[in-house]
Amino acid sequence: MKRDERVFLYGEDVADYGGLYQVTEGLRDEIGEDRVFDTPLSETTLGGTAVGAALTGTRPVVEIMFGDFLSIIADHLINYAAKMHFNYSDDTSVPLVVRTTYGAGDQFGLHHSQDPISWFQNVPGLKMIAPSTPADYKGLLKSAVRDDDPVIFFENKQRYDLSGEVPDGDHTVPIGEADIKRSGKDMTIVAIGGMVDVALDAAESLANQGYDCEVIDPRTVMPLDKETIIESVKKTHALTVVHEAARFGGIGGEIASEVADEALFYLDAPVKRVGAPFTPVPFAENLEQMYLPGAQDVETAVIDALE
Amino acid sequence: MVAPEERKDLHENLLLNRLFEEKVLEVYEDSGIPELPHLSLGQEAVGVGTVFALEEDDWLAPSLRTRAVTLMRLSLRDVVTGMFGTESGPTEGRTTQHHLGSSEANIMGTTGMIGSHLNVAAGAGLTAQQLGEDRVTAVFFGDGAATRGEFHTALNFAAVEDLPVIFVLENNQWIEETRALDVIAAEENISEMSGHNLPKEVIDGQDVDEVLNTVSEAAERARSGDGPTLIEAKTYRYRPHAEVIPERRDEDEIAEWKERDPVELHRDYLLDNAIVDEDWLESTRDSLMEDIEDAFEFAEEDSLPDEEAMYKVYKDTDVDMYGGVR
């Protein structure tokens, strides 16, 4: 925001209160009340005005408090943001960033806990980012703000208290480049967002059991760096995909299909998908924990595939 | 107020809109047009008057029936090739003339979701405010769109943030084939539904002067930081919602509205005040018709676009059709 005066940030409770998760705490004092401000409780207004502002020369960053509420701005994201570059006679695009939180684990119930990434994976024109580390959060958020296309930036609620090294200064991470978090030769595990930590925990445990897993964090779901995934599968000859959304219809199926298309004969094991069951996120503590994919689920899937 | 020397220009635009729509109907019925016509016949004064009242760098967000926006901001060839989806068209066949956007012409792109452009137009107002630009945005929509949450949320936000936006409600009395007041909880005016704290004007949409003056005042308020205005222009469309829908409205009702035809009202004003004579009207009409015919001939001869035209999805990233990075 200091670098580019066209960037402004708004949303419900983001200015005075600093955001429900305090992500924007202090920002209004630092940047000014004209560029960091609170809005009515209307995602329709947030989605629509962000598109309109982005189309006409600014770079809005809008916060949608819970990813579940993306359903309300789905019209503006799907029919507007994703399609205007296509729909214009010139080079106009929609450089907006929608920051949102997602994921279960807080007993917030079925409408404040979903992973909505798959809702948008079939929409040409959108970009989707789900960082898993503090450094990537910084680097990818900067890239998202500077990008000329509409970006949905998914922040996993369970990872806000994660700490880690964050490079100083103008640290950016390119959109569309996966990160190999752990190198291994027996199994490629592709994990999305908050599931990266889960996959790394599983990989540690699996290493003790004699399975050497490579863990890949795509970081960007759309565009997807499929080359890194396919190269890895050609080396390990096996694939497990992990995401928080329901296993059926998730991005994992798409990754598996890409591998089947381009590296089927490198595979020595069935492809495994780890995700939530096909049910809404339950409220009760034990049910929610059963619902959430965990390290044990990943371990079971990997061993199942390799044995 | 319209200066006398601008009167001819204003009338040319009204006439262009009228003659163009009549030609569209003729060609559509005769040999077909790929873009299903949603004609503005009868409503010309609202679009023409509004665009005429604003500056070239003001943003316009049309409804799909506000033909005046594309006719007054693009070339005739662009409008017609846009309707035919041919390779010389402004978007090379990617989208229809109804919804296309052009930052060069300050036309905001829209979608087929009626009313979803209301908050988008408010967003253009945010840009003007953020960048300190002296530009206003006019957004056109019908009585149907006013029943959506978009209407209420956009008016609330624009009013509370004092955004430089003019909401032009073209009340043509009918939501597709349903009478608006049968499904809207209002006594007489659609704008009764808005309890928001902003100026509201209910005007005669058939009187281009009334449109123009009301929009000019709203634009002045917007430019001086006094925020948005809601203008409800009472008007009427002579044709069905779309040309594929059979007419089932009362013939007498249509005839009654035609007695106050917006183009004829302004023509009479010009003749009564000796601003033009019959010869001027005839030669203007002939010259406009020549341009319109030329644009249709051009579009009808034009080729369909090459495949490459449809791969314009991302500006910043070279993404292949299957989602991977190239």
Image (spheres, coloured by chain):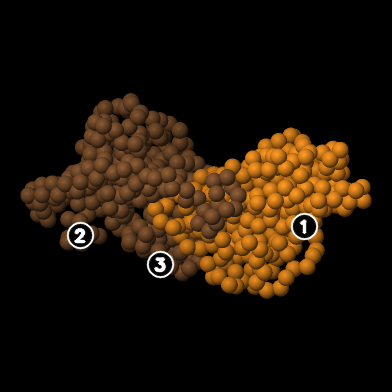
Specify the subunit that label 2 lies on: B
Residue pointed to by mark 2: B6
- Left or right: residue B136 versus residue A101 is left
Q: Which chain is orange?
A: A
Q: Residue A303, how many percent across, how many down? A: 86, 41
The residue tagged 1 is A181
Farthest residue, direction right: A208
For the residue pair B161 and B62, the one nearer the viewer reads as: B62
Q: Quadrant of the C terminus of chain A?
A: top right
Q: Secondary structure at mark 2?
A: helix
Chain letter for mark 3, please: B
Label 2 CA crowd tier, 10 Å (few <14, some 14–19, many 20+):
few
Q: Nearer the viewer, residue A91 or B304?
A: B304
C-alpha span from label 3 to label 2: 23 Å
Color of chain B here? Answer: brown
Residue at the (53%, 67%) spot, across then down: A6
Dot 1 and dot 2 within a common chain: no
